[in-house]
């Protein structure tokens, strides 16, 4: 199993009250599998993704990614792990506005300490069809193009797992479809495991498996 | 109006911006409040004491004895005074019973002096009001307390003033007419009737003859009218006519110059605050573009948005102003330290209504001007921005941007002129400030270019830091500019002080004299030479001095060239002062010590057949507004002498050698009645005292200035003034650091998303920290060095042009300030970055 969670819980404290965003989630994902986490707004799907990517610390329970228990890792170890083993695509793209498309993609490689940064970044952008937009700033690119840069940044280190949080949520139907086609295509070609968070049932159906989440619990 | 609440809540929801903006502007305005409170306290204190300082309502002074008839006739035709009294003031050496001597100010008074205030004397261990009539009947004197030690004299013993011995009858405990000059030489009161017996006043002696009047008046303007009418009637340029307020203004003149300079430093602090404020407001407004888009899409007009955003600025401006009034008033007593010894009384600091209005206006206008260039950029914004992701692209530098920037600079200039009370100084300051800003900006752009072009280090964090600095030029240049200007101001004052101090320091091989002597009569020269021979001393630059009045310039009556009026600016005041005096002429062939020809040709030897060439000192020629080729006509004891200016001389006055504003060649004035001035080269302590005592004993009318003591006193005054300047500079620096904090903190907050992203991409804390540290280090090192470099350039020109002194590099302050800057900046950056680092990267998913 490339992903395995056991009795995963996440509780947020808000003032005097406690909100349990994730409750006793235990799941397993096979290597190369594509799964979708679906649920309504506020169901806890994004929190679950935060826990799986190590962006948030679990209150209790464990997460094992590719044999490494990330819940036992320090911030430093988590950062190193994310740099090499995991790719994340955000709904809001989160590109650095004053960096070009090429520089935004290079950033991942530089953090991971990879060689041939330029070459690999260019290849990644070529893979997402942006070989002619290398020196463009995010402000000069369309929404779909920005998301493609973000995808290139996420896959450039050839991670084992790609996490995607509503990647087409900010795009129109047609562009969104193209972006999703691209993600599925890359995952298939590179044998990457995909964990897709969405509220779109149709999109979720494109994954091999669907995990429904409601009130923080798997149903 | 109902919409205002949304904009108020916008401010409340952006508390950190609001607080930083208020704090930023409040610090800038605090320096203004402090200074205004200080200025008002001086002027109120002095004005309230102006009648006491003069001891009368009105006065006339001249270097020549005043003829009663002439003045009485003039007064008869204008306004009859209620009472009048005469006084004569002179500087002279006096000796105690053991032969100890000291330069003092002799004030010979008549029995009814003063009309206002009193001279409290201590007699038989009791304080009482001195009755001046007692001074008239016998050779008795009242002396200032410090003379007891300096002359080794006790009450009841005798002191020698000129040729006569006076009994010390009392010590002056409190003198309502104590002015600034008394701190240079202690005062001795004697009766006017006894002055003649001293034989101090001889031909050419430096003495001031005054007539003081008590005049009943309902409105002060009556005194001003009287002054102007008398000037017309008496038409005597060498006669000074003044009201009691003129005297108080003269008393505070030394502090006025300081105030002007402090004023300019306070403008610099305000300007720094403006830079920080503008930066903060820009960041805030960028954040508000989306809400603005929402307001517009809901039907609000651009004008409404613009006005409501301006209203926000106004609110922040008013709060800043109120806060600065509290800050400034709390800090102002610290400035009192500098008046100790400069003013004869202690200042009482008070906040005046005028100051409150001024600061409120500055807060409101200032905050609007700070925001105007950025506000003008959003004026044409369209609601479709809601459909875009990038909002900064809507901020275009349009006509409104440049216009409001221009208005801001004009406001800065107007403020400088007003603070300095001089168009020239204000313009020079604004010009230099803009020049310094341009230089720093130029340097900053060069650094950005170099950083872009050359890859200095391979380190990833350094590369990112450079990339951020280069890609965000507006914020980078803003930081370069604000820190650079702060460092410039911090270093400029110690730098100039170092140059002035160097001029006044007496190293072992210095040519600074020990004594400067004046009032030497022609027939006393041989006796003086005998004394110098006895002590094996050679007199230096002994120069004849001839009193004269300037009658005409280029055949025009000098009187017609005078500037009259009450509301003269600083340049006019200086010009008027230099024009109202009689002049001391001298003659010699060749240049003296500390002199060099600035323009023109050396003085030729005297030739009967041609018009005499004369030489004028550079600044004196500027004040007189004359140039080479102009012809001046002098009246020397009724004889007219004409001279054409052939050269303009630069004189290094700090050599303390006998130098003159106007020089004739040898031969023209030789027959005119004259006295001599001379200097004594540096001699050791024991011989110095013996020589001084010996001169006083043999030639009691000759005045001797102890140059060492004088230099010490001047250095003391400079030290006191530099404390004040450093105090204001600290406020300025505080403003600079707050700008730095505002910018660094805001950038770190703005970058919190970038930090979260870097974390989500696997960037370690140390990598992210090192990235920010590099950014801060690059910016602070370069901006600090630019500030210091520009400071060196400006101080060089100021030393050479304004102070005529040698430029001295003072390295301690620049090194310490740059190191301090780097350390403080790194600390600020660490704290600000830390806050952002602790925000969870999952924030990105929740957006």
Image (cartoon, coloured by chain):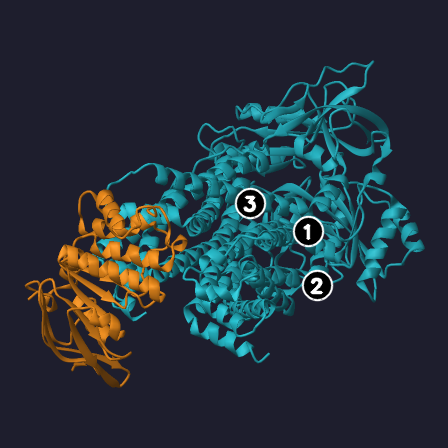
Which residue matches tag 1?
B250
Residue drawn at 45 percent across, 32 percent down? B507
Q: Residues within 10 Å of mark 2 (few under 14, many from 20)?
A: some
In this view, the residue in front, A88 or A110, is: A88
Residue A16 rendering spot, x and y as whole percentages: 26, 86
Relative to B589, say whether B558 is above or below.
below
Closer to the chain start, of discs 1 and 2, is 2
| Residue B348 falls left or right of residue B135 | left
Q: Which residue is mark 2?
A: B117
Query: What residue did someone put label 3 on?
Result: B434
Q: How many marks do you count on the picture?
A: 3
Of tags 3 and 2, which is closer to the observer?
3
Q: Nearer the viewer, residue B252 or B843?
A: B843
Q: Secondary structure at mark 2?
A: loop
Could you tell me which chain the residue with mark 1 belongs to?
B
Could you tell me which residue is drawn at 45 percent across and 58 percent down?
B392
């Amino acid at each position: 199993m490339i992903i395995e969670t056991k009795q995963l819980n996440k509780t947020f404290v808000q003032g005097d009250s406690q909100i349990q965003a994730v409750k006793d989630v235990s799941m397993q994902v096979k290597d190369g599998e594509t799964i979708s986490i679906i649920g309504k707004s506020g169901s806890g799907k994004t929190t679950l993704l935060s826990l799986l990517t190590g962006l948030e610390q679990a209150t209790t329970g464990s997460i094992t990614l590719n044999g490494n228990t990330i819940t036992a890792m320090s911030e430093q170890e988590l950062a190193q792990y994310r740099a090499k083993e995991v790719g994340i695509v955000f709904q809001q793209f989160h590109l650095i506005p004053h960096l070009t498309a090429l520089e935004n993609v290079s950033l991942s490689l530089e953090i991971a300490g990879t060689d041939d940064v330029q070459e690999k970044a260019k290849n990644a952008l070529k893979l997402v069809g942006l070989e002619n937009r290398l020196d463009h700033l995010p402000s000069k690119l369309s929404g779909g193009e920005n998301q493609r840069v973000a995808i290139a940044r996420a896959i450039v280190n050839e991670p084992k797992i790609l996490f995607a949080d509503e990647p087409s949520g900010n795009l129109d139907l047609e562009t969104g479809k193209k972006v999703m086609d691209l993600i599925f295509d890359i995952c298939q070609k590179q044998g990457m495991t995909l964990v897709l968070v969405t509220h779109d049932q149709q999109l979720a159906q494109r994954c091999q498996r669907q995990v429904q989440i409601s009130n923080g619990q798997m149903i | 109006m109902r919409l205002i609440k949304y904009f108020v809540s916008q401010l409340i929801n952006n508390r950190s911006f609001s607080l930083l903006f208020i704090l930023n502007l409040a610090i800038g305005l605090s320096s203004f409040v402090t200074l205004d409170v200080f200025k008002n306290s001086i002027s109120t204190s002095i004005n309230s004491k102006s009648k006491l300082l003069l001891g009368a309502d009105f006065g006339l002074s001249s270097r020549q004895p005043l003829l009663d008839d002439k003045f009485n006739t003039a007064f008869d035709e204008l306004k009859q005074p209620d009472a009048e009294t005469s006084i004569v003031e002179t500087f002279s050496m006096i000796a105690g019973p053991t032969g100890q001597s000291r330069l003092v100010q002799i004030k010979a008074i008549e029995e009814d002096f003063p009309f206002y205030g009193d001279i409290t004397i201590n007699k038989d261990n009791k304080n009482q009001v001195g009755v001046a009539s007692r001074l008239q009947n016998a050779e008795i004197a009242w002396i200032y307390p410090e003379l007891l030690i300096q002359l080794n004299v006790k009450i009841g013993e005798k002191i020698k003033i000129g040729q006569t011995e006076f009994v010390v009858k009392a010590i002056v405990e409190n003198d309502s007419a104590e002015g600034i000059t008394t701190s240079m030489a202690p005062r001795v009161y004697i009766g006017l009737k006894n002055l003649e017996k001293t034989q101090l006043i001889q031909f050419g002696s430096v003495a001031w003859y005054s007539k003081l009047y008590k005049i009943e008046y309902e409105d002060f303007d009556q005194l001003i009218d009287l002054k102007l009418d008398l000037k017309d009637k008496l038409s005597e340029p060498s006669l000074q006519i003044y009201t009691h307020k003129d005297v108080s203004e003269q008393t505070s003149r030394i502090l006025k110059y300081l105030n002007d300079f402090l004023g300019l430093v306070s403008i610099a602090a305000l300007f720094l605050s403006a830079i920080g404020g503008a930066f903060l407001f820009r960041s805030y407004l960028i954040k508000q573009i989306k809400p603005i888009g929402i307001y517009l899409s809901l039907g609000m007009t651009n004008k409404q948005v613009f006005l409501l955003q301006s209203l926000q600025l106004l609110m922040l401006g008013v709060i800043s102003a109120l806060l600065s009034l509290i800050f400034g008033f709390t800090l102002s007593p610290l400035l009192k330290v500098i008046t100790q010894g400069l003013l004869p009384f202690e200042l009482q600091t008070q906040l005046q209504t005028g100051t409150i209005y001024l600061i409120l206006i500055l807060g409101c206008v200032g905050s609007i001007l700070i925001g105007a260039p950025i506000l003008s950029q959003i004026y044409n914004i369209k609601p479709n921005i809601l459909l875009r992701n990038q909002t900064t692209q809507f901020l275009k530098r349009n006509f409104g941007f440049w216009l409001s920037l221009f208005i801001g600079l004009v406001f800065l200039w107007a403020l400088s002129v007003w603070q300095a009370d001089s168009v020239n100084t204000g313009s020079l300051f604004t010009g230099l400030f803009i020049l310094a800003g341009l230089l720093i900006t130029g340097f900053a752009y060069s650094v950005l270019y170099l950083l872009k072009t050359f890859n200095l280090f391979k380190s990833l964090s350094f590369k990112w830091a450079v990339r951020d600095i280069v890609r965000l030029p507006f914020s980078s240049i803003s930081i370069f500019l604000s820190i650079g200007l702060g460092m410039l101001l911090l270093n400029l004052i110690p730098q100039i002080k170092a140059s002035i101090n160097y001029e006044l320091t007496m190293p072992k091989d210095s040519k600074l004299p020990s004594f400067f002597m004046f009032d030497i009569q022609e027939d006393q020269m041989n006796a003086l030479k005998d004394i110098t021979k006895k002590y094996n001393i050679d007199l230096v630059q002994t120069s004849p001095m001839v009193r004269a009045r300037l009658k005409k310039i280029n055949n025009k009556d000098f009187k017609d060239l005078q500037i009259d009026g009450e509301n003269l600016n600083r340049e006019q005041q200086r010009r008027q002062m230099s024009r109202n005096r009689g002049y001391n002429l001298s003659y010699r062939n060749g240049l003296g010590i500390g002199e060099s020809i600035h323009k023109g040709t050396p003085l030729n030897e005297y030739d009967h057949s041609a018009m005499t060439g004369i030489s004028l000192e550079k600044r004196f020629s500027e004040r007189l507004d004359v140039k080479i080729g102009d012809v001046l006509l002098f009246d020397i004891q009724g004889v007219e002498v004409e001279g054409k200016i052939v050269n303009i001389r630069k004189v290094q006055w700090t050599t303390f050698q006998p130098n003159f504003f106007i020089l004739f060649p040898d031969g023209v004035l030789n027959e005119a009645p004259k006295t001599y001035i001379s200097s004594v080269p540096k001699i050791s302590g024991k011989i110095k005292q013996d020589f001084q005592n010996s001169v006083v004993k043999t030639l009691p009318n000759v005045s001797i200035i102890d140059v060492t003591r004088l230099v010490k006193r001047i250095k003391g005054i400079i030290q006191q003034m530099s404390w004040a300047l450093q105090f204001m500079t600290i406020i300025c620096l505080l403003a600079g650091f707050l700008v730095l904090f505002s910018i660094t903190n805001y950038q770190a907050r703005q970058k919190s998303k970038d930090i979260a992203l870097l974390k989500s991409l696997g960037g370690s804390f140390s990598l992210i920290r090192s990235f920010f540290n590099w950014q801060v280090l690059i910016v602070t090192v370069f901006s600090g060095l630019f500030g210091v470099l520009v400071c060196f350039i400006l101080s060089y020109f100021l030393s050479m042009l304004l102070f005529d002194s040698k430029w001295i590099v003072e390295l301690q302050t620049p090194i310490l300030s740059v190191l301090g800057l780097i350390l403080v900046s790194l600390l600020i950056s660490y704290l600000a970055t830390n806050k952002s680092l602790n925000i969870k990267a999952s924030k990105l998913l929740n957006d």
